Amino acid sequence: MSENKVILSVKNLKTYFDVTKGLFTKKQIVKAVDDVSFDVYENETFGLVGESGCGKTTLGRTIVKIYEPESGSIEFQGKDIAKVKGKDLISFRKDMQMIFQDPYASLNPRMTVGEIIKEPMIIHNIYNTDEERERRVVELLKIVGLKPDHIRRYPAEFSGGQRQRVGIARALAVNPKFIVCDEPISALDVSIQAQVVNLLKDIQKEMGLSYLFIAHDLSMVKHISDRIGVMYLGHMVECGPANDVYHRPLHPYTTALLSAIPIPDPDTAKSKQRIVLGGEVPSPINPPKGCPFCTRCTKATERCQNERPEPIQVGTRIVACHLYER
Amino acid sequence: MALLEVNNLETVFKTDAGEVQAVRNVSFKVEQGEALGIVGESGSGKSQMMYSIIGLLAENGVVKNGQITFDGKDISPSQFTNKKDYDNFMRECRGNTMAMIFQDPMTFLNPVLKIETQLVEPMLNHTDMTREQARERALELMRKVGIPSPEKRITQYPFEFSGGMRQRIVIAIALANNPKLVIADEPTTALDVTIQAQVLELIDDLKNESNSAIIMITHDLGVVAKLCDRIAIMYGGKIVEIGSDKDIFYNPKHPYTEGLLRCISNPEDDEEKTLTPIAGSPPDLLNPPKGCPFVDRCTKAMRVCKDHVPEVTTINEGHQCACWLLDSRAVRK
Ligand SMILES: Nc1ncnc2c1ncn2[C@@H]1O[C@H](COP(=O)(O)OP(=O)(O)OP(=O)(O)O)[C@@H](O)[C@H]1O
Ligand SMILES: Nc1ncnc2c1ncn2[C@@H]1O[C@H](COP(=O)(O)OP(=O)(O)O)[C@@H](O)[C@H]1O
Ligand code: SF4
Ligand code: SF4
Ligand SMILES: [Mg+2]
Ligand SMILES: [Mg+2]
């Protein structure tokens, strides 16, 4: 693996939503993504974990240019995506693809599987003739483990796992360099999840792709990811190599999150002392002033209530917590 | 005698396309104070098996066959002279000796009633407590399930609670009358990991404190490993293997159970495990295979498997498996 070349570089990214209700009410802003920075390398899978509402989907959608960021920058293959225009924008739309959580909602029910996979090829003008496209569709169906004669069938005739494969084939149709996978396996059965995860891994090896892999199933994320970013309330609180993060978590939130995973082994699961976090994630409209985690952190001090910790490098990791400042 | 005993249960749904055979000849027992986990893929019949027992099947569903004994009484629908008697009897049971916790707390909570009403009413209906006593008990239950400032919270409506808090309220209602059996259908699936951990911890404490039996339906093997003493694996409307937590995790006998364990990774393991998916997808219960339900996906299938339902083999006391490989006639490698 040529591990070192950065393909995506996110710097101080902020994506906000205005959720103010009436005309005469105070302006209310959800800071869904608040000052997030990280890099993704070529051929790498970067896993993004965190509880629902922490900003994972918003971050993913900002990267593929579905949402407009408030501030900060996203560089993809060395180009600032906010500034790409014309030809560059078209090639950005081709190189950067997204796979969605819900295999039921993300496919047009009135199109055949063949039409669904062909559509991006037509938009991006990748092949000249319909025969070439058709040939590629058949190839893609084989890659994702479906049969050539599935080409004329409709999404409704497929199971969840099969539909997710169609979604993957559609994303691959234009030979992308990067795929944002937003909870691609969450809606699937355990035995089918492994099918899709292995498929994504094989395709990566074959085609040299990078993934941003979003999920709340921490075991699967660890399994597929080279590096991992942990989000809490719009912030990335810890980021580093998957094994390091899982075996020696630094941030108190990462520690608690990992401790909460139910371990599929009765002896360990029944004897393990878990750190059970009290309370719940605060509202993103009114986040704590200091460290976002200070309302639930057992190690919080007065400083944590008032002063937001900056991300700092600790060994292989980047951590935002006052405990690690010297 | 076991608290709950189910024998040869068969449940079907009548649809335009034909009969959906949701539960196909299932037998199992739950002892007092025991936690039984039921694991299986989506559509394998877990929920309908439970609904058949507690009388909550949809209109088009029928228990076609089988005997259900609960707390010494035969509660099979066929035992009752008519549907109304059965429904009345089960309604009485459900608020009292049996309780149910669903995945989505809002299928259970009434959005327009205060929490107080929802907690107190079942107690007034099923016991001779006074309103004051019931309110006291409600506050005590809320404290027990970890709701902060219960005096204030008890006057609020469900929408004022977060998902995790609502599930706590449902658990509090379920426990109100000290049920003998609590059935929880994916109680933590909709919750975030750290909130899931809180609720699982709560269920675990309650299990240790009371003598209630728990049936926990889930697709998460981590959840059953943590909470359950025994585990039943369902596939295609049948229980294909049942045993203690250790039997199932450390000595699985059914190819589907083995396959399932090869599909999951343990985040505490150091080295990368290669996940081995089970190819194919589960059977359609409108038209399930005649023999073993797993035959289309089983890499060890033999000729007998297609047309003949595998017999149940007892591996040890409490560990049973329905697979032809365990038959003495099977050729072992
Ligand atoms: N009202 C109904 N009419 C027809 N078929 C039904 C009905 N309810 C359930 N079924 C079918 O019964 C079978 C078993 O469903 P059940 O709800 O028990 O699955 P489950 O194991 O609980 O799945 P999940 O994990 O998705 O909750 C499925 O094939 C389902 O489609
Ligand atoms: N289109 C939107 N308008 C307003 N708020 C939004 C929108 N999308 C997301 N949010 C809010 O932003 C926060 C982050 O959401 P999201 O990125 O979907 O989280 P995750 O994917 O981690 O669950 C949440 O508080 C969510 O309610
Ligand atoms: S900065 Fe303070 S509150 Fe935040 S995680 Fe570190 S110790 Fe806890
Ligand atoms: S009975 Fe046959 S098909 Fe079924 S699990 Fe056993 S070997 Fe496989
Ligand atoms: Mg999301
Ligand atoms: Mg169910």
Image (spheres, coloured by chain):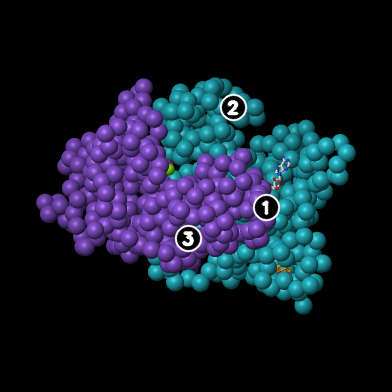
Chain letter for the residue marked with disc 2 in the picture: A
Q: Nearer the viewer, residue A281 or A88?
A: A281
Viewport quadrant of the N terminus of chain B: bottom left
Residue position for label 3? B203
As drawn, B190 above or below B86: below
Residue A98: image tag: none
State left or right for residue B149 relative to residue A85: left
* Residue A71 visible somewhere in the drawing: yes
Distance CA(mark 3)–CA(mark 2):
49 Å
Distance CA(mark 3)–CA(mark 1):
26 Å
Place of residue B291 in the rendered image (x, y in percent of width and height, measured from the top left): 21, 39
Residue A54: image tag: 1
Chain letter for the residue marked with disc 3 in the picture: B
Tag nearer the camera, 3 or 2: 3
Mark 2 Cα shell of 10 Å, populated few (<14), some (14-19), many (≥20): some
At label 3, the amino acid type is: Ile
Distance CA(mark 1)–CA(mark 2):
33 Å
Q: Which residue is depicted at the point 86% across and 41% down?
A: A25
State left or right for residue A39 relative to residue B163: right
- Furthest-left residue in this view: B329
As drawn, A253 above or below A69: below
Mark 1 Cα shell of 10 Å, populated few (<14), some (14-19), many (≥20): many
Q: Which residue is depicted at the point 52% across and 34% down?
A: A104
Q: Secondary structure at mark 2?
A: helix
Chain that is coloured purple in the picture: B
Mark 3 Cβ and ligand 6 under 8 Å apart:
no
- Colour that chain A carries in the picture: cyan
Residue A119: image tag: 2
Chain letter for the residue marked with disc 1 in the picture: A
